[in-house]
């Protein structure tokens, strides 16, 4: 237990459009039910870029970071196990579901759809750094995990970087792909987008038994990594296939009878991708739209194709502890098949703004902040 007041360095977003600043916050000892964790690695996600741009309303200032791995520093009274029942001790490596549902709203109580909870608290997104316990984001030396957080011990064979490599894209895809659009053995799967969500979709589609996987994205550096990792059978570079018609044709060409894909997954975040995705799917196919996490506005689609193709269009929003548990359980299998660390570019906490601008440039796949660097 700590008695002295110590301060913790954290990367905080104070104004939208502004740079992230390194500030210091008081460390709180763990209250009953809470867990204090020293952060080893914390991912930077596309959502963080959108937060900086002011595309999601959040209470500022906020310590960003909703995907991280760390070491248990202090367990509050009543916490002696993780969410699977495994014994938890100081020094254990842990990860945690990034949101805490309210447990009282219609979506929590009647539907058990915890990611749809209207009052869920999300680390690194909707908790002000000015409000106790302050340390509610992963881009910091330490994070205070509040009672109700689903915490998991990291499987022993995984390194910290392997755990954080897919970031929130991993559990998001476990929810959307495995939970809602279930790929079947032998299916042709087309994935739009070569960022972490697209990569995670390709990896899980492969493990789930997809026959042919086509990744449509860019830039070339990302597709090179996708190829090296073996996540797809064909990578279509959007910088070479610059017209939508060319991309649609190229994707359909690898499907039986050029009829289109059994399953198309949208992982771009670009509204204009949706009309293309609809065109890439076969009649009677499925279209999982999982990449539109922030509101980029309207787009033009022809809904006739949805009816005529008898297309199943599936949305999927974020993830809950249930999906996170499955993610942690399946991650050793993912790491066995794919070199996850290849996705990562590591930065010290103080270089957070450099990491964010490199991510904006799109040449790196997964920037990770390591406060101990
Ligand atoms: Zn994220
Ligand atoms: Zn709720």
Image (cartoon, grey):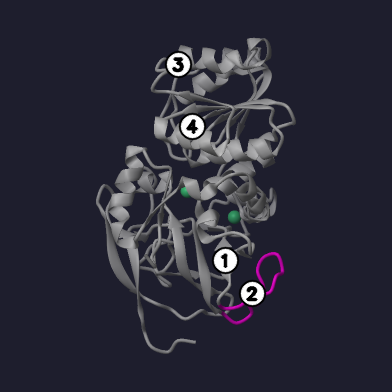
Q: Residues within 10 Å of mark 1 (few under 14, many from 20)?
A: many
Residue identifier under label 3: 244
Q: Secondary structure at mark 4?
A: loop
Q: Are marks 3 and 4 in contact (CB under 8 Å)?
A: no
Give the quarter of the image for residue 257. Answer: top right
Q: Indicate whether 293 appears above or below 93.
A: above
Residue identifier under label 2: 88
| Viewport quadrant of the C terminus | bottom left
Q: Residue at x 59, y 42 (%)?
A: 173
Q: CA distance from mark 2 to mark 1?
A: 9 Å
Q: Position of residue 308 (x, y in %)?
A: 65, 12
Q: Is residue 82 magenta?
A: yes
**Is 284 positioned to the left or the right of 17 in the image?**
right
Residue at the far top in the pictured view: 257
Residue identifier under label 4: 193
Marks 2 and 1, the one that precedes in the sequence? 2
Q: CA distance from mark 3 to mark 1?
A: 43 Å
For the stretch drawn in magenta, the main secondary structure is loop
Q: CA distance from mark 2 to mark 4?
A: 38 Å
């Amino acid at each position: 237990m700590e008695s002295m007041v110590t301060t913790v360095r954290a990367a905080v977003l104070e104004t939208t459009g502004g740079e992230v600043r390194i500030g210091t916050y008081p460390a709180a000892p763990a209250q009953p039910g809470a867990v204090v964790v020293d952060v080893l690695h914390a991912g930077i996600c596309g959502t963080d870029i959108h937060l900086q741009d002011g595309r999601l309303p959040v209470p500022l200032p906020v310590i960003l970071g909703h995907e991280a791995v760390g070491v248990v520093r202090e367990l509050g009274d009543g916490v002696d196990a993780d969410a699977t029942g495994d014994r938890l001790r100081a020094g254990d490596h842990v990860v945690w579901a990034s949101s805490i549902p309210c447990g009282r709203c219609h979506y929590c109580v009647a539907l058990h759809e915890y990611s749809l909870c209207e009052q869920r608290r999300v680390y690194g997104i909707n908790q002000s750094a000015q409000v106790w316990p302050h340390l509610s984001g992963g881009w910091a030396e330490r994070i205070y995990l509040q009672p109700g957080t689903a915490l998991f011990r990291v499987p022993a064979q995984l390194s910290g970087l392997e755990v954080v490599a897919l970031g929130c894209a991993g559990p998001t895809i476990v929810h959307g792909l495995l939970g809602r659009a279930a790929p079947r053995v032998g299916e042709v799967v087309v994935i739009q987008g070569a960022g972490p969500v697209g990569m995670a979709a390709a990896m899980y589609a492969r493990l789930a038994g997809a026959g042919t996987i086509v990744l449509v994205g860019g830039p070339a550096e990302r597709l090179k990594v996708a190829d090296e990792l073996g996540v797809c059978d064909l990578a279509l570079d959007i910088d070479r296939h610059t017209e939508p018609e060319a991309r649609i044709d190229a994707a359909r060409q690898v499907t039986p009878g050029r009829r289109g894909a059994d399953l198309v997954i949208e992982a771009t975040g670009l509204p204009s991708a949706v009309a293309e995705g609809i065109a890439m799917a076969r009649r009677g196919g499925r279209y999982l739209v999982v990449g539109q996490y922030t509101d980029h506005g309207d787009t033009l689609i022809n809904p006739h194709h949805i009816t005529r193709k008898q297309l199943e269009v599936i949305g999927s929003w974020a993830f809950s502890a249930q999906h996170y548990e499955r993610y942690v359980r399946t991650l050793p299998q993912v790491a066995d098949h794919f070199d996850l660390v290849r996705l990562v570019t590591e930065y010290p906490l103080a270089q957070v703004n450099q990491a964010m601008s490199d991510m904006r440039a799109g040449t790196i796949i997964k920037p990770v902040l390591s406060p101990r660097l």
